[in-house]
Amino acid sequence: MAQSFVRYEDAVNWIVGLVSHGIKPGLKRMEMFMEKLGHPERRLKFIHVAGTNGKGSTCAYLSEVLHRGGYDVGTFTSPYIEKFTNRMKYNGVDIEEQQLLDLANRIKPVFDEIAVSELGSPTMFEVCTAVSLLYFGTVTFPDYVVWETGLGGRLDSTNIVTPVVSIITNIGHDHMDVLGDTIEAVAAEKAGIIKSGVPVVCTVEDPVALEVIKRVAKERKSTIYTLHEEFQFEAITNEENSQKFRFEGPFRKLPELEISLNGPHQLKNASAAMMTLEVLRQYYALMVEDDQLQEALKCTQWAGRLELVSQEPKLILDGAHNPEGAAVLAEALKSTYTYKKLHFMIGMLSTKYHTGYLSHILPIVDTLIVTEADYHKKEDAAKLADKVYQQLAQLGRTDVEVIVETEWKSALELLQSKIDPGDLGVVSGTLYMISDVRAWILRKADSEKGW
């Protein structure tokens, strides 16, 4: 049979082009994919991670610890920051372009069969999920796959798997146009990853959402390990690029651990990973030496989350794009960093809760540059600026300089010019823009950004 794609670029363009099919919650197409591909997902042990914020960092901690502990690890995350292959990693290394090309050619005939069925065309994310399952289940065979949901949980294409442990990091105001317009509805969707008898690690703190998750865990007879109940952490020190904390779980205490990722919220993400590792140690005889654990936590990095990309001028990228993300970003900026003035650049998608996001950011900025992401769902900069002006008026702040610059590269140059010695610059908002800015600053190149 002739190959559908000759070059890696052809395969990626086909997959990314499927974004036009939109989001189609449901597992029927994934079930057909898996059946026709010989069920690669059944050969693997998954750690399934859902939540509004914190998923990526938690996945990064887990992947690093498992790998340094001597295990082969697959990692599936989204969206990617710079290159399509970032989504699928084996032992911390992106899938090779040739392997992705080969797998796309294996998937395309199956895709065509499903597309003409009553189920209709699979989506871009469903194809990505199928490619990753083929990669891990037929090419690399990792000991564990750290498996991040795309959107929600219950009807997300990643929910085709039965994991060895599930993690729910938090519940917040994001994707409510798809998941439901209340915290209870969003929590029910996230709780959909809980499988019968499979242990759950949960760092959700919203009491309404937590009640939903506990109820689902009880119904499915899944043991749940909840932050502040079965396990907890305590901050010891907080410095830029170094946070130390104590961890205490039901099985043991660890008096001092250190991470390099910034922001108090990272202690919660690291603790979610720690509790998960403890569950694996108890249930599956996971063996990771404490020195390996400590070194891995300290070395874990995660692009685009409070990431320092330039020292002169001092510039940080953070992909906070919802109220909960903005809250932890603001807290980190107040507790971790010192600066004379804070210069901020923002670009958002039109579907996000802008007012909630801005409520955390506007009280602390000196300059706000409003721009637009290079993405079809971008929010109009002028419209976003109108919301900024309204909220600043409510706050009684007349000292904030607000600049509207629709072209993000021009906005970035303007931001950099504003950052004097002793000041701090931050680029935040949609990860589509973070992806572009990061590639431009670090490599003076365009990114391959995508969902």
Image (cartoon, rainbow, N blue to C red):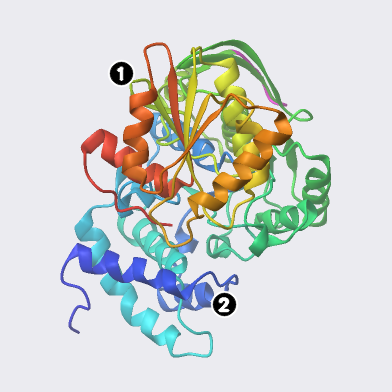
What residue is shown at x 71% (from left), y 30% (from top)?
395
Query: In the structure shown, which secondary structural element does the residue marked by tag 2 occupy?
Result: helix
Q: Vertical placement of 83 versus 359: above or below?
A: below
Q: CA distance from mark 1 to mark 2?
A: 51 Å
Q: Identify the magenta region.
A: 250-255
| Residue nearest the viewer, comparing 400 with 156 | 400
Query: Which badge, 1 or 2, comes first in the chain's sequence?
Result: 2
User: Does 236 appear above or below 285?
Assistant: above
Q: Nearer the viewer, residue 326 or 135?
A: 326
Q: Position of residue 213 (x, y in %)?
A: 77, 49
Front residue (pair 195, 411): 411
Mark 1 or 2: the one toward you: 1
The vertical placement of 363 against 30, above or below, is above
Q: Mark 1 = which residue?
A: 312
Image quarter of the C terminus: bottom left
Q: Is residue 70 left or right of residue 201?
A: left
**x and y percent of residue 342 in the render?**
50, 22
Give SS at disc 1.
Answer: loop
Residue pointed to by mark 2:
28
Q: Is residue 355 above or below residue 65?
A: below
Residue visible at 32% across and 82% down?
A: 109
Examine the image and state in which quarter residue 434 appears. Answer: top left
